[in-house]
Amino acid sequence: MPTPTEDAPGALLTFLRVLGMDLLILLKIVAVLAAAWLVERITYLILRRGYARRKARGRDEFTQYRFLRNAVRTVVVVCAFFAVVYTIPALRSFAFTLFAGAGLLVAILGFAAQKAFSDIISGIFIVAFRPFRVGDVIQVGQQGLFGTVEDINLRHTTFLTFENRRVVIPNSIIGEERIVNSSIRDESTCQFVEIPVAVNADLERARSIMQRVAKAHPAQYDNRSVEEKAAGEPEVAVRVVDIKDGVVNLRAYVWAADPVTARVMRYDLTERILIQFAQEHIPIAVPIQHFVQQNPFRTLATGAVDIQQDDQ
């Protein structure tokens, strides 16, 4: 009487025959998968070694390395999939029948793949023309995403926001948006610190306080040129930028080493300046709207209540 161990090979062969396969085809599939893995690893080692030799050149080479790394992996997986399909006779004949006889299906697949091809082409353009690179701090859109580029592949770009969230955006969408790159040439950032004061405030005194507080911040540094220093330009310029609704906006131009440090510095300076203004009795202006309600119980012909509000 055959044991379960002896029946196992027979059951496997029966299962393979049902699928239209034999041990030779199974070995071919294993060989295809092994070859795909080997090609992917060899390519990875070649790219890694090439990047290691050019690492000192900066983010451009690293961006190209990450893009090529992702592209090679995708191409190898797709090629391995089609090779496996071609190796199995049942799947091969089914695929030929499907793509040869179903023209409508091919048209639908081609239409659905337009977005994918658009993303791939946009990804190639991003790597070729380098509007941003892996590691750059950018803003996508007028008031959109602001963060660090973490990865670029064939279909999408991954950003790491300052809230430690990863946002994935298709390359075709990024290619159509306005990009503000804070790292492409020089990461030094001039941060605007705006404080609203009353129209009757002592502007010279307020300007002096803002300059003193800004220069005392550890992240601030002097970005003046030799000519500007010789001309007597202030280290931190403070100007009146707007007067509206009884509010005078004072803006301090403060420099920091990078955009992230500049943003945190702005938050600190805003708080410190407000505290110093309160201590030295500099009036802060806040726009106030008065709402006057008239005839709140006047009933219309339909029975509804008409409430009129006048903004002053």
Image: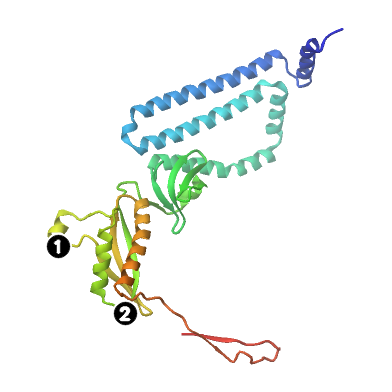
Q: Residues within 10 Å of mark 1 (few under 14, many from 20)?
A: few
Q: Is residue 292 above or below residue 162?
A: below
In this view, the residue in front, 97 or 56, is: 56
Q: Secondary structure at mark 1?
A: loop
Residue 290 x %, y %: 48, 83
Residue 185 x %, y %: 30, 46
User: Farthest left residue?
Assistant: 230
Q: Which numbered disc flags the more N-terminal residue, 2 or 1?
A: 2
Q: Residues within 10 Å of mark 2 (few under 14, many from 20)?
A: some
Q: CA distance from mark 2 to mark 1?
A: 28 Å
Which residue is found at the position 69% from the left and 25% from the top?
Answer: 92
Which numbered tag is attached to residue 232? 1
In the picture of the structure, the residue carrying the numbered disc 2 is 199
Q: Secondary structure at mark 2?
A: loop
**Horizontally, is 187 left or right of 91 in the view?**
left
In this view, the residue in front, 95 or 305, is: 305
Which numbered tag is attached to residue 60? none
User: Farthest front residue?
Assistant: 279
Which residue is found at the position 52% from the left and 44% from the top?
Answer: 118
**Horizontally, is 28 left or right of 218 in the view?**
right
In this view, the residue in front, 47 or 235, is: 235
At label 2, the amino acid type is Val
Which residue is found at the position 65% from the left and 38% from the top?
Answer: 106
Which residue is found at the position 23% from the left and 73% from the top?
Answer: 204
Which quadrant of the view contains residue 197? Answer: bottom left
